[in-house]
Image (cartoon, rainbow, N blue to C red):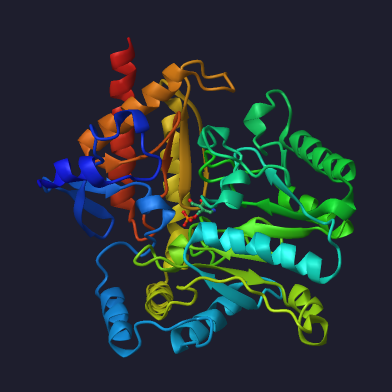
Amino acid sequence: MELTASAKRHLLVPAADMEKLGSKSLLRLERSEGIFVYDETGRRLIDGPAGMWCTQIGYRRQEMADAMSKQAMSLSYNSPWYTTNSPAIRLAEKIAEFTPGDLNRIFFTTGGSTAVDTALRFVEFYNNALGRHAKKKIIVRKDGYHGSTSLTAACSGREGNWKNFDIASDRISFVSSPNCRLHPGLTESEVLELLVAEFEFRVGELGPENVAVFLAEPLLASGGVIIPPTGYHARIKDVCERNDIIYVSDEVVTAFGRCGEWFASEKVFGVTPDIITFAKGVTSGYVPLGGLAISDRLIERISGENGKATSFANGYTYSGHPVSCAAALANIEIFERDGLLEHVREITPYFQASIRALEQLPLVADVRGIGMVACVECLIDKTATVATDLDKRTSLRIDELALKLGLIVRPLANMCVLSPPLVINKRQIDDMVGILKEAIMRAAVEMR
Ligand code: PLP
């Protein structure tokens, strides 16, 4: 069968539009190089979202292929339930060097969802092991995204993703999205006070003895690149500490260079969490891998003398997969050798200034970002706080026009999100932002 016809007939892709199943197939990519991908017709496209916030070191790096091939030819796989391997050990040690505080115990998973799921299962295990069987509630935020397992999907505050699924919501409590745009007329510090008061009130309402964990992305990425008010994370962490609530920072997007640091929680957002989850950039998307770093302090309370007759029976066939871990080590080597974190710190102001210049355009209501992530929010009524269907259609049109002009933009409701491969240079930023600008202008003309 011809490929497009076969895709329509046999593939079920993530977030498939079920109404159009069988009649529509996604853009098919055939190859990639640097910051570019090439479609089935050979057309070159700038990869604006870096896959899905993943491809930090860019595409087609020979060292990555060599490292994976070498590992596949020495030890391709064995069970992580009763054996281990050198790449997994070396990678755990390396990641522990990068994590803040005492987050030195590393567990490997298959991606971001399984990393967050494991973090939540660890918290369950921890509290049960300590005999605190009522401490079960998970506090999360509206607009957050944490994955696609049953539990992580239930923790994701984007209700649009819930339709026709059963959501395990009895243990989950949502607080507000830390989005200052939702509070017109209030200053950033006033919004901060509101958010902290709401969180404290929620903990009191649920009862601290029932609240196990606060789960939060440092910036709400898939929710529209929402950057909380300055000081937010530290203030919430303070409430968590006073109430013996574990703070999990979901760094699936922000870790591995996206904000110019290995991990962003402490150095960029001013908080030292109890657990950090990571995925995506750890292998620059070359192969699947995720994981979490857990505080020694938590581990000590439930291990050794304190862990008698228990095993942390959570894991995956591919936990610590040798080929994935070898890829991650090669990825980190490239970061270090090429000074990629330094490059990100150097180029971020240029990227942010270029994208912020779009604020002057028609249809653009807000431009925000941090590090190498930015979002252009499009609203026909620039003062609105809720997007209409027309706003969403207009943004989709902008994405279509950008694609025609040679740029992939992540389609996200009424928002155009850019998070390019971190190896991007200034000329390529000009090209990328220039295309987005042209697409917005053309969409505005079409609307007249
Ligand atoms: N957590 C965050 C913050 C994410 O953005 C994502 C995916 O985009 C996930 C978790 C889930 O990761 P994965 O799709 O690798 O399972």
- Residue furthest to the top in view is 448
Decide if residue 123 is on the left or right side of residue 399: right
**Quadrant of the rendering where the C terminus is positioned:** top left
Give x and y (percent) for residue 238.
83, 55
Q: Quadrant of residue 296?
A: bottom right
Q: Indicate the position of residue 248 as horizontal and vertical percent values.
A: 68, 59
The answer to whether one can see residue 39 in this image is yes
For the question of whether residue 266 can be seen, the reply is no
Taking the image as shown, residue 90 lies to the left or right of residue 431, namely right
89 relative to 118, above or below: below
Camera-nearest residue between 448 and 295: 295
Residue 365 in the image: above or below residue 297? above
- In terms of depth relative to the viewer, which is nearer, 335 or 32? 32
Identify the residue at image location x=88%, y=40%: 205
Q: Residue at x 74, y 77 (%)?
A: 299
Foreground pick, 396 / 398: 396
Where does residue 184 sit, x and y in percent of width and height? 68, 24
Give the vertical position of 242 relative to 376 (above or below): below
Residue at image position (51%, 43%) is 222
Answer with the quarter of the image where residue 343 lies: bottom left
Task: Please give the count of numbered marks on the rendered protein.
Answer: 0
The residue that appears at 42% across and 67% down in the rendered structure is: 340
> Horizontal and vertical percent for residue 100?
66, 70
